[in-house]
Image (tube, rainbow, N blue to C red):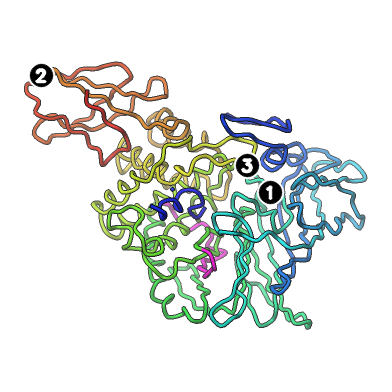
Amino acid sequence: MSLKKALFPVLLTGFCLTSVHAQLMDGNKHFTRADTLRGTLSAERACYDVSFYHLDIKIDPTDQTIEGYNDITFKTVKNFKRIQVDLFPNMKVEKITWNGKELTYKREFGAVFIEFPEVVKTPSSQTIRFYYSGKPIVAKRAPWDGGFVWTKDKAGDPWIGVACQGTGASLWWPNKDHQSDEPDSMMISIAVPSELMNVSNGRLRSKADLNNGYTKYNWFVSNPINNYDVSVNIAKYAHFSDKYNDLDLDYYVLRENLEKAKEQFKQVKPMMSCFEKRFGPYPFYEDGYKLVETPYLGMEHQSCVAYGNKYKNGYLGNDLTGSGVGTKFDFIIIHESGHEWFGNSVTSKDIADMWIHESFTNYSESIYAECEFGHDDYLKHINGYKHSVRNDEPIIGSYGVNAEGSGDMYYKGGLMLHTIRSIVGDSVFFGALKGVALKFRHQTVTTNDIIDFFNKKTGKDLTKVFYQYLKYTHIPTLELKKDNNVVSYRWKADVPGFDMPIKVSLNNGKWQTIVPSPSWQSLPVKAVSEIVVAEDLYYIDIKKL
């Protein structure tokens, strides 16, 4: 996600719930029936597995309306007579058909419960056609809120985009709006006024003049795709292309920005080289890679990355880390492209585990800095994020109610990975990092999937470390005290038995690893002038007593 909760404030100075009760509560948060319908993998959702979408719609820039249908092809998982498909209540359901029959349905908040005239049995493959129309909600401040952006370029021509992560793809097209289920592939057919162009995910299969003032663009996505990644970008775009090895690189920008883009987008090739080294092959070679200029800051739309950083390095020209490293590269190109591996290819099953998307992607920025500018700049960049962590609420959100955790999933999550790298060492860490991207390629995963994999791949039980940073607001505090020639130390942390190893120096600049626990331990030394902790290698607090 593009900085939805974490970064905007910087510019101004960043247990499983399965109940279907109408009201849920977690701490000070109250969850409604609508939240449950949106976030729970209910029986009406779990009974079918989407294999293919064909979204076929016309978008009218003048009226700001959508009309058309979505063919939803799915495999039956359990016998059923009713399923849930999602569409925001402000959008109109025209009709839903199956095998030539019109189906009945009931609506409750954003859920559309579709009734079948007979039991649909497993195993089978079925297709329903869901006709709909309406005016999708307009984003007030994309990408921090979801909706369409209807604007114009400098020449006065329409320039349209959509960002819907968190809010839900069902704000503009009907689908099974739960991250656990992705189609194996998808066709995106968008009709727009013929003087304009539509750019969506995947590869352009064809375009056709409809002889009514509209032209239809047919884009095919040959890989699994998150619902929120499905995108439309409409404008009078200029297009240019390049290659990175066998990967097609395509760029769509406003006409007045063509020369700027040709210069700024030179960062893509070294980024690809770095990320493929650390994360494995680009996950969507079959669909290519695109950067598309959008009227909002950015979003990780799969194989169709939204770019709105105004051709500036940093974050709209700012260095979010304050280290001087952040303005050496274009934040949006690097961050949003990092999501191709983490978020788009490796996807959390529940939005509560969005740290899997954002923590790894935040860390990818520092990885890129290391690739391009060296290890010292890596350390400056990753540590520069420490001042932006809020430690306000847990990184993991509440399950089953479409609830993200704290925006600390960005900076704190990246610093957690940096800390784990320091614990296990570079070689082991990078093997695990690439292993995550390869093992879970094109899959949906849970927090425990990631932790279990790291434990197995590194040969260390890192569960307590992950839990402390992900499930609690506090970071571990290393308490130190010196009494004559004895140094005593312990961890103060929320996780019982927290015992993370850490490097310290007691004399002569020589580093050694100690393994504090919640109980005091002592280390006798002949003469101690100062206790030094390798603070730049970890995200911790230090308290000298």
Q: Between residues 213 and 99, which one lies in front from this camera angle? A: 213
Image side of residue 367 versus residue 85, left or right: left
SS for tag 2? loop
Q: State the CA–CA distance, disc 1 to disc 2.
A: 62 Å
Q: Between residues 41 and 398, which one lies in front from this camera angle? A: 398
Residue drawn at (80%, 60%) of the image: 132
Magenta-span inclusion, residue 498 = no
Amino acid type, label 1: Asp
Whole-percent x and y of residue 191?
A: 72, 73
Stretch in magenta: 279-296
Image side of residue 260 versus residue 321, left or right: right
Q: Which mark is residue 402?
A: 3
Residue drawn at (40%, 31%) of the image: 474
Mark 1, Cα crowd under 10 Å, few <14 / some 14-19 / many 20+, is many
Q: Which residue is mark 2?
A: 485
Whole-percent x and y of residue 67?
A: 77, 66
SS for tag 3? loop
Q: Which residue is mark 1?
A: 177
Mark 3, Cα crowd under 10 Å, few <14 / some 14-19 / many 20+, is many
Amino acid type, label 2: Asn
Between discs 1 and 2, the one toward the N terminus: 1
Q: Is residue 76 above or below residue 3?
A: above
Residue drawn at (41%, 24%) of the image: 494
